Amino acid sequence: MAKLKILHYGHPLLREKAFELKGVGRRERELIQAMAETMYAARGIGLAATQVGVLERLFLVDVDQEDDDPATRRLQVFINPEIVWESEEDAPFEEGCLSIPGVNGEVFRPQRIKVVARDENFEPFELEADELLARVIQHENDHLNGILFVDRLALLHRSKVAGQLSKIKEATLEEIAALKGVEYPLEV
Ligand code: NI
């Protein structure tokens, strides 16, 4: 299956709340496969379905992969995830996002979490995570609710990246307009 297009900041779908999945069939397996290929090709450690324009509560995480070496990959699939517990203490971490290329910023999040979800076979599981894994799960879970890491930046940080964000948004809106043939109609 071909790689999927990752939507960029400014795309309205990134702000939507995703819907629960009722099960895993052929379509969902193909989506997971395509998302995994897309995530690894982009060298990401997490990817939410929302980011490829599919409003379903599904994301992938792999914090183990090293140096683009397939042998070190360990893909974790989260379907209909729910963070059921989070630690009191918050920790800062420099985050980025495949949907916001070139932008990084420090985000405070709970250091440890407990999440319940379903795996690629729609089997329920519970996981207690800390450090990077906890970080990525919270970041991806945010995507399913239309929240981006830049929303969680301190005001000062946010104003520092405001210029970059509006450039990405402008490019995204131009691209959408071009697809619709609104702004740049084809000459015949
Ligand atoms: Ni992201």
Image (cartoon, grey):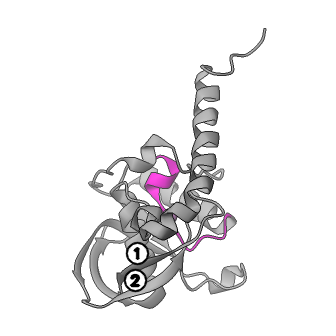
The quadrant holding residue 143 is bottom left
Q: Is residue 183 left or right of residue 92?
A: right
Q: In this view, does 166 lie to the left or right of 66?
A: left
The answer to whether residue 92 is above or below residue 48 is below
Q: Residue at x 73, y 16 (%)?
A: 186
Residue highlighted by disc 1:
137
Mark 2 CB within 8 Å of ligand 1: no
Estimate the x, y position of residue 169 in percent, counting from the top left.
Answer: 57, 45
Q: How far apart are marks 2 and 1 (CA)?
A: 5 Å
Q: Residue at x 52, y 45 (%)?
A: 10
Q: Does the magenta stretch include residue 44?
A: yes
Assign a secondary structure to mark 1. Answer: helix
Estimate the x, y position of residue 165 in percent, counting from the top left.
Answer: 57, 53
The answer to whether residue 126 is above or below residue 179 is below
Q: Which residue is drawn at 60% across and 50% down?
A: 4
Residue type of the residue flagged with mark 2: Ala
How many badges with numbers are in the image? Answer: 2
Furthest-left residue in this view: 84
Q: Does the magenta stretch include residue 127?
A: no
Estimate the x, y position of residue 136 in percent, counting from the top left.
Answer: 45, 76
Magenta segment range?
42-54
The answer to whether residue 29 is above or below residue 119 is above
Name the foreground residue: 164 vs 148: 164
Q: Residue at x 49, y 64 (%)?
A: 158
Residue type of the residue flagged with mark 1: Ile
Residue highlighted by disc 2:
134
The answer to whether residue 13 is above or below residue 163 is above
The image quadrant where one finds the C terminus is top right
Name the foreground residue: 106 vs 28: 106
